[in-house]
């Protein structure tokens, strides 16, 4: 294959999103480690990886801080010789009128030396598409989907041009499907007539559209979107270089002997059903944030409950709630206050579990996953190839073995927690 060269540097705005895109690239045979800090990039050998993901918990922080994070990540990736960058956000375009999709994209565009970029959140494999600038989940417009109930980033407008424009002083353009299907020359002519616009929503109805997009963005310094586009970019680069893609079957990672825990912070329906299924066989502690008047004492009560459980079976700890209870918590604590309190408690509990010998974790929720990784001081992981676990299986080898399966709240069948735990057990048996 010749010398391996780092081709793509990816900034993901949360951990589960970073895991997903890394695992999809691994499944394509693209070696793609994931790190959770700019400092950890120093450990990456640019001759043994073709892409790298930097996963940072920046979706909901202050826009100014997110911009500084983005600038630091691009600078760190440039030190590795990377010249092409990708900004990965949620396929459902999770954001608020303040950001952080717009501010981060602009910061990365300037830092990378690019003149324009696209926003391609479509993920046709999971029925997320964009047509005439409007997002659909299956046949349902985004604003009518489950995302309108998101406790932190409720998505109430399907028109992504209108969603993005309040986040930036830049005007936002659209690459409509009718232009896209005419080919690269038509797209380039459309962009040339765009009155100096830098930001463009890209219509994407299927995988063929992703291939069309790659034809005109292949050498752009920055592209942005969800999980699907990087895979097609990698295929296009390898095809141009005459390198054959070989799919990977890396579905087992090194073992992590120790106890097992599920930690859930997502309020999405699939996670709630997964918890209900888990509780039929194993202990589950549901955390009521309104009981956490003294957070330190509250965490100690949770860990005391853990000590009282049998050591030979997994357990679950959850801040997840249905819509009504989420609204009750937010009414008492505020939206940001409730999220911050949940993060703090989850992080302290995760740290306590590690100290008690837990080494296998299943974590539900993007923000929750980021909090757990940060609290466990995990800086770099090996990622498995994408499969039925949704791309969330990863492993830290040093300073001590820890295995995790991280998942976005809305993904997975009712038995997901059981499948995830069994995969990590299988790694020990092989």
Image (cartoon, rainbow, N blue to C red):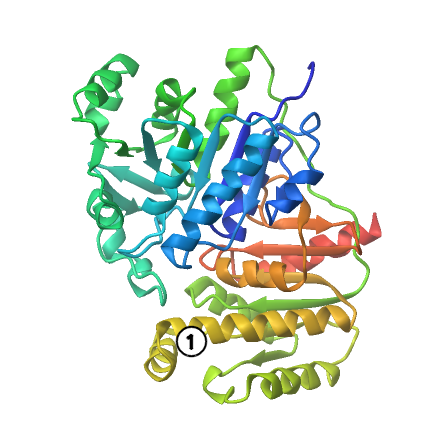
Decide: few, some or many residues near mark 1? Use Cα within 10 Å; few <14, some 14-19, many ≥20. many
Residue 320 on image: x %, y %:
48, 72
* Residue at horizontal 39 percent and vertical 71 percent from the top: 336
The percent position of residue 323, horizontal first and vertical second, equals 35, 73
Picture quadrant of residue 286:
bottom right
Let me know if residue 297 appears in the view.
yes
Task: Choose between 294 and 250: the one closer to the eye.
Answer: 294
Task: Say above or below: 169 vs 342.
Answer: above
Q: Nearer the viewer, residue 56 or 304?
A: 56
Judge left or right: residue 142 versus residue 213: left
Where is residue 227 drawn, in percent x and y? 46, 40
For image coordinates 68% across by 85% down, the residue present is 305
Q: Quadrant of residue 314?
A: bottom right
36 w.r.t. 305: above or below:
above
- Look at the image and tell me whether residue 415 can be seen: no
Element marked by disc 1: helix
Task: State the quadrant of the N terminus.
Answer: top right
Number of numbered markers:
1
Nearer to the camera, 408 or 356? 356
Is 367 left, or right, of 138 in this rendering? right
Q: Is residue 241 left or right of residue 255?
A: left
- Which residue has dot 1 on it? 338
* Image spot of residue 197 (x, y percent): 22, 30
The image shows residue 364, relative to residue 35, as above or below, that is below
Quadrant for residue 156, please give it: bottom left
């Amino acid at each position: 294959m010749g010398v391996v060269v780092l081709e793509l540097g990816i900034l993901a705005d949360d951990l589960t999103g970073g895991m997903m895109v890394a695992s999809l690239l691994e499944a394509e045979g693209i070696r793609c480690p994931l790190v959770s800090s700019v400092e950890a990039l120093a450990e990456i050998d640019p001759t043994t990886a073709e892409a790298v993901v930097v996963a940072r918990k920046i979706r909901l922080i202050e826009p100014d801080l997110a911009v500084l994070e983005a600038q630091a990540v691009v600078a760190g990736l440039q030190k590795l010789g990377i010249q092409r960058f990708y900004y990965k956000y949620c396929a459902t375009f999770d954001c608020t009128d303040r950001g952080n999709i717009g501010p981060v994209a602009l910061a990365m565009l300037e830092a990378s030396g690019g003149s324009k970029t696209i926003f391609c959140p479509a993920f046709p494999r999971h029925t997320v598409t964009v047509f005439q600038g409007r997002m659909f989940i299956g046949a349902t417009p985004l604003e009518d989907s489950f995302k309108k109930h998101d406790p932190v980033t409720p998505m109430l407008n399907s028109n992504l041009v209108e969603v993005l424009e309040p986040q930036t002083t830049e005007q936002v353009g659209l690459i409509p499907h009718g232009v896209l299907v005419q080919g690269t020359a038509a797209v380039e002519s459309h962009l040339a007539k765009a009155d100096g616009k830098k930001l463009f929503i890209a219509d994407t109805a299927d995988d063929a559209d992703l291939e069309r997009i790659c034809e005109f963005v292949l050498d752009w310094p920055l592209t942005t979107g969800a999980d699907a586009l990087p895979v097609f970019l990698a295929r296009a680069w390898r095809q141009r270089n005459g390198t054959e893609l070989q799919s990977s079957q890396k579905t087992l990672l090194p073992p992590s002997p120790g106890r097992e825990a599920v930690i859930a912070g997502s309020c999405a329906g699939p996670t709630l059903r997964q918890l209900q299924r888990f509780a039929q066989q194993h202990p589950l502690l549901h955390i009521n944030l309104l009981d956490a008047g003294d957070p330190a004492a509250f965490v100690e009560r949770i860990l005391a409950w853990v000590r009282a459980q049998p050591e030979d079976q997994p357990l679950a700890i959850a801040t997840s709630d249905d819509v009504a209870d989420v609204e009750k918590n937010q009414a008492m604590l505020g939206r940001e206050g409730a999220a911050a309190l949940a993060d703090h408690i989850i992080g302290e509990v995760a740290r306590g579990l590690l100290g008690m010998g837990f080494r296998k974790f299943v974590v539900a929720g993007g923000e929750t996953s980021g909090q757990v990784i940060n609290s466990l001081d995990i800086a770099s992981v090996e990622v498995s190839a994408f499969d039925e676990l949704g791309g969330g299986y990863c492993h830290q080898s040093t300073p001590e073995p820890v295995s995790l399966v991280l998942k976005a709240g809305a993904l997975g069948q009712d038995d997901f927690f059981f499948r995830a735990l069994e995969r990590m057990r299988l790694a020990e048996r092989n």
